[in-house]
Image (tube, grey):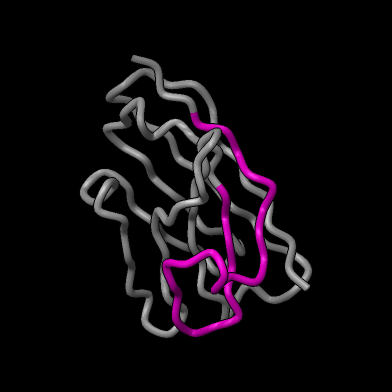
Amino acid sequence: QVQLVESGGGLVQAGGSLRLSCAASGRTFSRLAMGWFRQAPGKEREFVTAINWIDSRTYYANSVKGRFTISRDNAKNTVYLQMNSLKPEDTSVYYCAAARSLYSGTGPSEYDYWGQGTQVTVSS
């Protein structure tokens, strides 16, 4: 089994930056595709970004392209989400997710493990 714990959320002004971290434990961090999703009140969980295991290829939702960057440090069993040029519409609870796959996906159903989430609030 894999446990995921997110951190790094908080309150930031529009145009500012945050870096989220997701630490994995319980099972090897290797051979897991990793992703970030977000969910605002009254909304369904939406895909933000993901990174493959097999080739480290990354994928981004159109709404965050050019602003967010996903990366992973396997030595620390941690995946990161660098968030720049934040907008009020980025306000959400952000969730780290892991899939027992060499390739990541964009649908929540494709992921096997989830963190508890970290709140990101962008003020305007």
Q: Looking at this view, name the residue that lies furthest to the top.
A: 124
Tell which of 35 and 30 is nearer to you. 35
- Horizontal placement of 55 versus 62: left or right? right
Q: Looking at the rendering, in which quadrant would you find the N terminus?
A: bottom right
Q: Percent position (x, y) of residue 55?
A: 37, 82
Labels in figure, total: 0
Q: Percent position (x, y) of residue 14?
A: 31, 21
**Residue extent of the magenta highlight:** 95-120
Residue 112 vs 86, above or below: the answer is below
Q: Which residue is drawn at 78% across and 68% down?
A: 26
Q: Which residue is drawn at 58% across and 70% down?
A: 111
Q: Per the image, is 101 magenta? A: yes
Q: Percent position (x, y) of residue 10?
A: 53, 26
Residue 116 vs 105, above or below: the answer is above
Q: Quadrant of residue 27?
A: bottom right
Tell which of 50 and 22 is nearer to you. 50
Q: Which residue is drawn at 27% across and 46% down?
A: 63
Q: Looking at the rendering, in which quadrant would you find the C terminus?
A: top left
